[in-house]
Amino acid sequence: PVREAAPGVLILEIQPLDASVYVDGKFFGKAAELTRLELAPGRHRLEVVRPGYRTREIEVDSDNQSGPVTVKLERR
């Protein structure tokens, strides 16, 4: 039988809390709602967006991430 890989878990620390979080181009929610994110194994593109702030894009690996993913947006 084929076993599906267990999802990877990312712990997120994002500021500001009302920023929108996208993973691989799909909206996942506001930062305040997403402190823990389960993703399919592998690499993913995390994008954090909020008007008046610089957008941040980072690549994460849900299999090998040690420690929280911290993103703090800077004002424009």
Image (cartoon, rainbow, N blue to C red):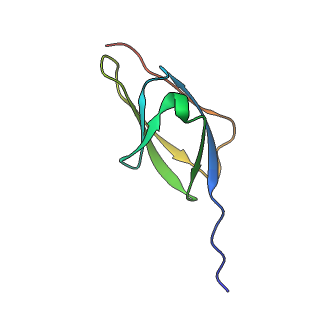
Give the residue displayed 30% in from the left and 16% down from the top: 52
Q: In the picture shown, does residue 53 fall above or below 12? A: above
Q: How many marks?
A: 0
Above or below, comparing residue 64 to residue 40 in the picture: above
- The residue under the point 63% across, 72% down is 4
Which residue is located at x 53 percent, y 44 percent? Answer: 60
- The one nearer the camera, 63 or 11, is 11
In the picture as drawn, the residue positioned furthest to the bottom comes out as 1
Q: Position of residue 13 (x, y in %)?
A: 58, 28
Measuring from the top left, give residue 22's x and y in whole percent. Answer: 41, 41
Q: Nearer the viewer, residue 21 or 47?
A: 21
State left or right for residue 49 relative to residue 8. Answer: left
Q: How far from the left and from the top, in percent, is residue 8? A: 63, 53
**How far across and down, in percent of the image, does residue 55 sit?**
35, 28
Residue displayed at 64% across by 67% down? 5
Query: In the rendered view, would you say 45 is above or below 52?
Result: below
User: Quarter holding the N terminus?
Assistant: bottom right
Q: Work out which quarter of the rendered image holds the C terminus and state it.
A: top left
Quarter assignment of residue 73: top left
